Amino acid sequence: MLEVSGLDVRYGPITAVRGIDLTAEAGTITAILGANGAGKSSLMKAISGLVPAAGGSVKLDGEDITRLPAHERARRGLSHALEGRRLFHRMTVEENLRVAWDFRSKGGSFRAVADRAYETFPMLTTRRHTPAGMLSGGQQQMVILSAALIHEPRYLLLDEPSLGLAPVIVQQIFGFIEAVCRERRTTIILCEQVAALALRVAHHGYVLRRGAVVQQGPAAALASDPSLSAAYLGN
Ligand code: ATP
């Protein structure tokens, strides 16, 4: 279980996250929702250690990891797939996976783990020797997810997996995310501006506004709550 208590994130005089409490139960999908600038990415980065917490704590399976550097959190099974297309565009799909492998702290065989990625995303199999920059946005997102899964994380943080993708591709990506959670028992925390789709696959959701949680609950209840207005979600 991941437990965030009273978390604050500041950038100089700007407070991006204020006093957030959040719990992600093992084996579930948690959606963090909110409009542009609500603080979603800052919360995710403070969980994975990419920005420091100015206050509060982050606990992973009971261990306080608030002061641990990002690579130590990764060693404990926390993987963060960042927003956008953070890929090596001139490298092939397979080479991108190999780079992720080089940062893997566990042992094992690259071939076995890479083949598991191709099993999860069969569409990549025929594209394995294609430079990542030549792929469609959806396929690039699949490579980003595959690279994160190379670490076989127990906890996977996904920053805006729908960003810039056509609706039909977004549905497919969310389908894969749901399957990863179900089949690998990976605990997934994803942040999204596209609330409706995220709530369809999530078990629990949090809505942020100006760095604070303004609403939370089971995803189904949030999805059917008419008070979750355009003002909070931006859609
Ligand atoms: P988006 O969907 O646009 O990524 P978000 O909900 O993820 O939005 P954050 O990116 O966490 O929101 O930003 C929250 C606030 O912190 C915003 O006011 C933003 O301008 C500010 N902010 C984010 N990163 C920095 C930074 N590196 N330096 C200064 N301010 C920042």
Image (spheres, grey):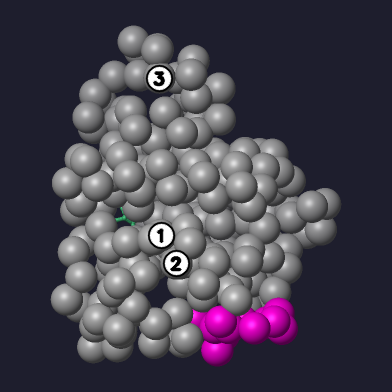
Asked if residue 107 is among those painted magenta in the image, a careful observer would answer: yes
Residue plotted at (21% across, 41% down): 168
Q: Quadrant of residue 182?
A: top right
Q: Position of residue 12 (x, y in %)?
A: 41, 65
User: Given contact means CB atoms under 8 Å apart, are the residues at marks 1 and 2 in contact?
Assistant: yes
User: Given contact means CB atoms under 8 Å apart, are the residues at marks 1 and 3 in contact?
Assistant: no
Question: Label 3 sits on what residue type?
Answer: Ala
Residue 89 falls left or right of residue 190:
left
Which mark, residue 144? none
Asked if residue 21 is among those painted magenta in the image, a careful observer would answer: no
Q: Is mark 1 within 8 Å of ligand 1?
A: no
Of the image marks 1 and 3, the number of the one nearer the N terminus: 1
Q: Which residues are magenta?
A: 100-111
Ligand 1 sits in quadrant: bottom left
Residue plotted at (78% across, 59% down): 64
Q: Position of residue 93 (x, y in %)?
A: 34, 79
Which mark's residue is nearer the viewer, 2 or 3?
A: 2
Give the labeled residue for mark 1.
121
Q: Is residue 222 above or below residue 63?
A: above
Looking at the rendered structure, the secondary structure element under dot 1 is loop
Which mark's residue is nearer the viewer, 1 or 3?
A: 1
Looking at the rendered structure, the secondary structure element under dot 2 is helix
Which mark, residue 118? 2
Residue plotted at (19% across, 53% down): 164
Give the labeled residue for mark 3.
223
